Image (cartoon, grey):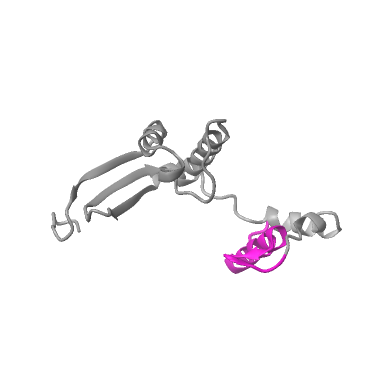
Amino acid sequence: MPVLPHDVEQGLGVLAHYLLWGSVGERRVGPPAGALLLKTPAKKTLDAAIDHLPEGPTEESRQAVTFTVAAIAQGVDSTISRGSLTGTDVYGITAVIAVEGAARMADPGYHRAGALASSVAYDPDAWVEFLKPHGMRYELADAVGFGESDGFV
């Protein structure tokens, strides 16, 4: 397989994304053309371009990287809470979260709607407990009143 310069690979990725989804980045630039394009001779060219894109990180390298999400929230009573969620393999946990989220929303008893944060869409305690067996760890700190400091805020 030929090796393409990084800017060519990046350009092919943007082109494929535009052709299939009709957007570049966050900006919508037109209707998706992918369905129509895949019924033309251009399909071979697009397939060849996609075949030259990188596969992504290996399983081993995904496990070697650790990530942390830190949050600080202030309640209406001015108390401040903080916490962190740490794990490895952001690709793998994203897939787990997407599947579990879809399964929970497909439950006949689920009646929430709209664009929701996980903490609103699902019971936060149950959600974090679900993530534990998938290598996620979390810490919650004691709340402090507004203006007080424990060296963190």
Could you tell me residue 19's position as x and y percent? 72, 62
Q: Is residue 40 left or right of residue 5?
A: right
Residue 79 lies, in percent from the top left, at 21, 52
Observer-nearest of 94 and 11: 94
- The question of residue 5 being in magenta is answered with yes
Name the foreground residue: 146 vs 9.
146
One can see residue 81 in this view: yes
Tell me if 113 is positioned left or right of 77 in this view: right
Task: Describe residue 27's horizontal placement relative to residue 81 as left or right.
Answer: right
The quarter of the rendered structure image containing the N terminus is bottom right
Task: Please determine whether, in this image, residue 13 is positioned above or below residue 89.
Answer: below
- Using the image as rendered, state which of residue 85 and residue 7 is in the foreground: 85
Q: Residue 10 colored magenta?
A: yes
Residue 5 visible to the viewer: no
The quadrant the C terminus occupies is bottom left
Residue at 57%, 65% in the rendered image: 26
Q: Nearer the viewer, residue 55 or 146?
A: 146
Quadrant in which residue 86 is drawn = top left
Q: Which residues are magenta?
A: 1-30
Image location of residue 58, percent across then percent down: 51, 44
